[in-house]
Image (spheres, rainbow, N blue to C red):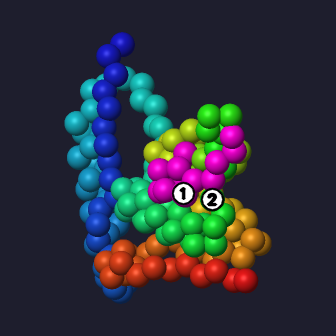
Amino acid sequence: MKQKSFKFDKPKIKAKNKTDNEKIKDTVLKMTRNFYEGLPSGKFELVIRKPKSTSRQHKALHVFFKWLSEALNEVHAWRVLDFMGKQTEVMWTPVTIKEDIWRKFTEAMYNKTSSKDLTTTELVKVADALQDRLAVNGIIINFPNMLDMINNIQHYEIIK
């Protein structure tokens, strides 16, 4: 049996009053009717998927990695590598934060290896867990919001 896939998004109408709610209801009913009438006869399965993390969240995540690497380097909490048989301290980068810290939290909490596989809620919960762990160790980092990113505001604090 040939499968057909349809994408059906909510209409982007915001209700300001009761009359607007009626307009939204009418719009959704019309869209549903048009959608249904265009389907061939047969059995159908409705699959509701949780939204994946957004591109804005991923951009903010990379800013968060940058801020975290700067904060850890500022307090000399460097990475320790085995280099040529000796323990060597190296500075953090946004990439090493992602690979060595973020990914471990993601795998431990949701058994997922990529941030792109997280839902919007899961990404927030991983960020919260990481922020909580950092705060216990005296590093306060806010997850970037749109205003922070526009103004390139650095939001971390080291508590000694």
Type of amino acid at the residue the image marks with label 2:
Trp
Q: Is residue 156 visible?
A: yes
Residue at the farthest bottom position: 17
Type of amino acid at the residue the image marks with label 1:
Trp
**Residue 78 shows which numbered tag?**
2
Residue 92 is a magenta residue: yes
Residue found at x 57% / y 66%: 73
Q: Position of residue 119 (x, y in %)?
A: 52, 51
User: Does the CB distance between marks 1 and 2 fall below 8 Å?
Assistant: yes
Q: Position of residue 17 (x, y in %)?
A: 35, 86
Rendering quarter of residue 18: bottom left
Q: Return the residue nearer the eye: 89 or 7.
A: 89
Residue found at x 44% / y 75%: 145
Q: Mark 1: few, some, or many residues within 10 Å (few <14, many ≥20)?
A: many
Badge 1 is on which residue?
92
**Image: magenta residue range:** 86-99
Q: Position of residue 125 (x, y in %)?
A: 63, 60
Rendering quarter of residue 158: bottom right
Q: Secondary structure at mark 2?
A: loop
Mark 1 / mark 2, whichever is N-terminal: 2
